[in-house]
Amino acid sequence: MIYNIRGENIEVTDPIREYVEKKIGKLERYFDTPPSSEVHVNLSVHNAEQKIEVTIPMTNLLLRAEESHSDLYAATDLVLNKLERQIRKHKTKVNRKFRQQGAPKYVFAEMEKEAANGKQLEDEGIDIVKKKRFDLKPMDEEEAVLQMDMLGHEFYVFENSESGDTNVVYKRKDGKYGLIEPNA
């Protein structure tokens, strides 16, 4: 794996780099052939919190995890645990499909079909217990944030009065707001 380690408000020293590469390198044991993908690691420090974000784009799978802790080395260990869980979950799913369908060429084709049909939710044991329908009121982003805060929700779906597109505003972990817009 090729490592791309960046630091925000922190100098990426050799010991830090070596520790991160050693820990993330342990993920190679989950693959028959080591992935040749690039590993993006972003280290940052805000107040007393040290944060690590790891993204590993691979064929048919995107591994991504982030963790915050007062100790960067502890945060690295925690993010490794998250990534390992993601890999195990993915491998279990692929193996289950392989056993059910028999031949490996059908495994990924079946996964793509299921994702398109929404059946993936059933396979992962996700149970949708409530569905909600509502009319989208045209408004600007600021009004959507005010509506979201007034309702006490973490996100709010609305029709953007300027573009006419369906948008989503959401509250981020850092307390700021985000906006999701469709590609035109």
Image (tube, rainbow, N blue to C red):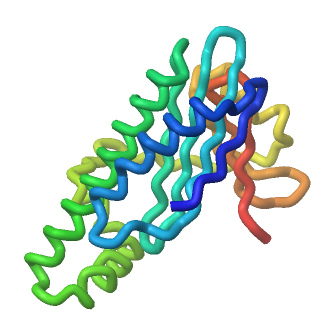
Please tell me whether residue 135 is drawn above or below residue 18 in the rendered image: below
Nearer the observer, 127 or 136: 127
Q: Nearer the viewer, residue 26 or 40?
A: 26
What is the quadrant of residue 12 in the picture? Answer: top right
Residue 92 x/y as whole percent: 19, 60
Does 143 sit above or below residue 71?
below
* On-image quarter of the C terminus: bottom right
Q: Position of residue 135 (x, y in %)?
A: 63, 49
Seen from the viewer's position, the closer of residues 16 and 114 is: 16
- Residue 2 image position (x, y, % from top left): 57, 60
Q: Residue at x 26, y 90 (%)?
A: 105
Q: Residue 161, image x and y in percent?
A: 86, 51
The image shows residue 35, relative to residue 42, as above or below, that is below
Number of numbered discs: 0
Which residue sits at x=54%, y=12%? 70
Residue at position x 37%, y 78% in the image: 112
Drawn side of residue 121 relative to residue 160, left or right: left
**As displayed, is residue 163 above or below residue 169?**
below
* Residue at position x 21%, y 86% in the image: 104
Work out which residue is located at the far top of the displayed protein and give it: 48
Image check: 174 left or right of 165? left
Q: Residue furthest front?
A: 14
